Image: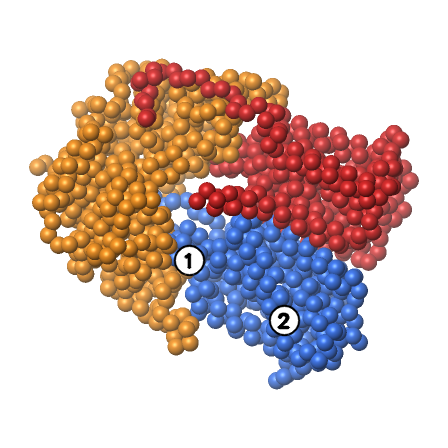
Chain colours: A orange, B red, C blue
Amino acid sequence: MVMLANTQGSADVHQRSGDSAAPVLSLAGISKSFPGVKALSGVSLDLYPGEVTALVGENGAGKSTIVKVLTGIYQPEEGEITIGGTPVSFPTAQDAGRAGVTAIHQETVLFDDLSVAENIFIGHAPKTRFGLIDRSAVVDKAQALLDRIGARIDPTVTLKDLGIANKHLVAIARALSIDARIVIMDEPTASLSHKEIEETYELVERLKAEGKAILFISHKFDEIFRIADRYTVFRDGQMVGAGRISDVSERELVKLMVGRSVDQVFPKRVSQRGEEVLKVVGYSHPTEFEDIGFTLQAGEILGFYGLVGAGRSEFMQALFGVTKPSKGAIRIDGRVAVIRNPNEAIGHGIVYVPEDRGKQGAIKGLPIFQNVSLPSLKETSHNGFLRLAREFRLARDYTQRLDLRAAALDQDIGKLSGGNQQKVVIAKWLATKPRVIILDEPTKGIDIGSKAAVHEFMAELAAEGLAVIMVSSEIPEILGMSDRVIVMREGRIAAEFEGEDLTPEHLVRAAAGIAEVRS
Amino acid sequence: MSTTAAETGPTGRQLPDRLKSPLQRFLGSWELLLLVVAAGVFVLNSFASPYFLDPWNLSDATFNFTEKAMIAFAMALLIISGEIDLSVASIIALTSTAMGFAVQLGADTPMLILVGLGVGLACGAFNGLLVTGFGLPSIVVTIGTMSLFRGISYIVLGDKAYTGYPSDFAFFGQGYVWWVISFEFVLFAFLALLFAVILHQTNFGRAVYVIGNNPVGALFSGIRVARVKFALFLLTGLMSGVAAICLTSRLGATRPSIAFGWELEVVTMVVLGGVSILGGSGSIPGVVIAAFVMGMVTFGFGLLNVPGIVMSIFIGLLLIGVIALPRIVRQVLAKRKV
Amino acid sequence: MIPSALKSREAILAGAILVLVAAIASRFPAFVAPGNLANVFNDTAPLIILALGQMVVILTRCIDLSVAANLALTGMVVAMLNTLMPGLPVPVILAVAISLGALMGLVNGLLVWRLDIPPIVVTLGTMTIYRGIIFVISGGEWINAHEMSDAFKAFPREVALGLPVLSWIAVLVVLGFVVLIGRTPLGRAFFAVGGNPHAAVYTGINVGQTQCAAYVISGALAGLTGYLWVARYAVAYVDIAGGFELEVVAACVIGGISIAGGIGSVAGALLGALFLGIVKNALPVINISPFWQLAISGSAIIIAVAFNATSSRAKGRVILKKAEHAT
């Protein structure tokens, strides 16, 4: 805590030295908690007209919560929002819209089955004298807005026919249509092509020129330094730094984000690679990934890095048998294995801890012990009949090993914190005694304590000879844990790094597809 | 507050198995509440009519729910898994029509049983294939097959009826095993036990709960979700076939309107038994007690000469009330806290 | 690409209807005589009205199985009202029918909105309750033609500009829905709530309230149809329009309205209803027993839902550049 306060202090210095205009929107002392988690504690954030403020922070730092507070989806428990100096509150999303705040989201939250023009004007369509929606005006105005941002999109087309990039443009047109003064862009360039990214930057410039205050959320440092004027850093629900981007270096920004240097947090481990366990050759899918091939050895932690939407999870799910590859082969211990469904993957000793814990990992509504025993029921049961005592024993053993924090084993897994849910999911797979464990964003959205426990445990597993694949978008985690890293970009393997070559710069460049530039 | 794994070492503390003893759980359960309601209805009925406690009267009362309950057991599993089958009453109609048709061709009783079970299974397979094979929503599919199955009965029978079932066929719906204990009641008790074991004691039953709580998570845990669901539709079709045999035997005739509207009563029985209509939770004992409650209420109204349609108001109110009440209580409690 | 496909779904249905009519006409030319077609339309009018009401409910990811019971109860109430007060003018009767129907819709809507009870449970329950209430208020008695006043019975049958009032009301309701769906914020909200409830919240739409509004509309139309039905057939009893709710849902499903919400059109619901209406009226003409009708509508539901599902199967993420260009 002391360290946090220090960084905050130094950030305040930044802020004071950099101020020029008055902020159009200010958040002060905003707090928001959910059962078991304090998502935001007393954060502040200022947005200035005609300027881009980059909001950076690790996953789970509170970025998406602040967006929901700003758009009226969540009500903060404490704190004040002021626009142009007057205090405001957003009890509903509509109020936020009226106050001129609009958000363009990660998963473009628009309506696939409505037309582009209808999407732009839903909720505030121009009306005729009779109070009816003026359809031709809707189309005309939509066309005008799209022209204004240089988007070549037919406003009468149905939204689902557009690609991701064009959907973003529609969302931006919508932002302009409500005459928003504050535009929130939540990872707008994730899963866009290089050309589309350039177009997005131009658009941001144009919005700046129109005097909009832009909150730009991004994980990509190159773009932050390219288009942002200011930065604000969140860590674990707190504001730990803010200021002008020209006053900060990438290194300082990373340090603010992570709050510690990498080797402090991650368990020290000596890589002891054993025999080859898994060999993947030419794995391909019609739309998701192509020609993925690598080998994995016992005792190794192989990191998979890439931008969101690079096809890493999609590939892992194919490896686990959820989706079918169109081409490719797998060898396990040198023998060809065919995996058509998760059942067969588990049979071959490949297990998968999914990224979407709530949907794919934890069976919420069922008790902890039943979650743990689920894939091992064949072993614990007798001729198809359940044996609860054996299930409890299994659950006791593995939850103890993972240091699970819960009241009892018959507690609903849904009542646990994210970190403890993750421990149960990992326990359930370890109970099957796998050869290969795939961990997809294993520490996404879980608290620091559980994070450390998961890392510690991964190191332990590798030391015991388990082959580990870890998908992660967090550079410190990738660097701190992996023996070797494969970088994926646009569904393909872009690069592989090991040893000396394993640097943040290499990873970021390979992931973004930027050529090596010597400075 | 949070301590890191390093501080506590590689092994944490051992967790207790259970927070509450099974007895404590039972004391707070929906099933106990239902039992109290059932006892209340029983007492009210015995006050309402002096004839109620007559053993033969009680035995007659069981026919009000045994056939529906047989379907309700399978429906409970289906609803717990997150699906529904609204075509069950129409499966009865089609199955009964097929048996009537077989009688015209000179089938004997064992043959009729085979026809009944076979047609029920086939209908269930048809529903299951449409839902799991083509990925269609079960509610629309079974609204469609509800019309289709009964529609075929209408095509075959029109405004006529099949009668002339063999005399030994009457045993299934009219026979008694011992004193006042009917064959149907014995079958009901046996199936209750069987389904309770399937749902609560087997890996298959566990899979049903897992799928109902999180179908994607189930898939990601190696459960063959489509297979389990298909099996449940088969089972529901089969039980509808069994109920069709009992009902046809009891009535001794088949009309296309047979068992009309039963799907509603079966679903109500399941929901009243504490099965969540959204899937994921519920128990067979709950459904069994709910069957008794509904059967006795219907019988009690009958003793008081209340017409059947008025009873349906009661059943409708029960269906909504049972779900609404806990929610209202929760909302009121939540407001108090604030 | 999809808007044309979406329109073409209606075009396919329209084509199917034309082929059906042409096939019937080739053997029985009298079927396509204008007078007979007008009869068919008039016969289908109640189904059209109810299908449109059902459409908005289904658009918001709900379902209303209580429409037929609502229709029957309202019909019984206005018929009894007429026997008690024969002098009551038709506009008052209409107002009573619509308000009573809307009230029953409101009950459904509030249960869904405020208590968050699954729509199918709510409307299965109210369906039996409304039906049961008819028995309670009527004592199971029928109200026959001679007990109803002439004005009461005449209204839906009165012919204006070549069509009975019943048909004109259906036309008005269709036009009203064209405006409601295409030109009002509420109409857009139905699509938004069903298509993406999450995003609807972000655009300031109250999901529950919108669903409740859909139920009120569906209920009001059921009430309106209740009076028209009872007056047209000049009889009211407990079981009128029994099972009609399934025909209404069938019309919607055949008309391409997605049970998952958010997809549908006025033209689709209209065509779906017309398809069923034509089949129903054609059966006796082509000498097929009317007992076939139930099986035909059941098959139509299954075929329609299967067709809609295959044409809108969810695709995975497109990551590969070449795949993006290929699609």
Residue at position x 69%, y 64% from top?
Answer: C72
Chain of the residue under label 1: C
Work out whether A207 lies above or below C17: above
- The amino acid type found where label 1 is placed reads Ile
Mark 1 crowdedness (10 Å alpha carbons): few <14, some 14-19, many ≥20: many
- Is B117 placed left or right of C58 in the picture? right
Q: Provide the residue designation for mark 2.
A: C96
Provide the residue designation for mark 1.
C205
Q: Earlier in the sequence, mark 2 or mark 1?
A: 2
Say if mark 2 contacts mark 1, CB within 8 Å: no
The image position of residue C98, as x and y in percent, is: 60, 69
- Residue at 49% x, 24% y: name it: A409
Q: Give the spatial CA distance, label 2 vs label 1.
A: 31 Å
Q: Residue at x 15, y 37 (%)?
A: A9
Judged from the image, the secondary structure of the residue bearing numbered disc 2 is: helix
Of residues A197 and C221, the one nearer the viewer is C221
Q: Quadrant of residue B59?
A: top right
A318 vs A98: above or below: above
Q: Residues within 10 Å of mark 2 (few under 14, many from 20)?
A: some
In the picture, measured across the screen, residue A15 lies left or right of residue A348, that is left
Chain that bears disc 2:
C
Residue at image coords 56%, 49%: C118
Quadrant including the N terminus of chain B = top left
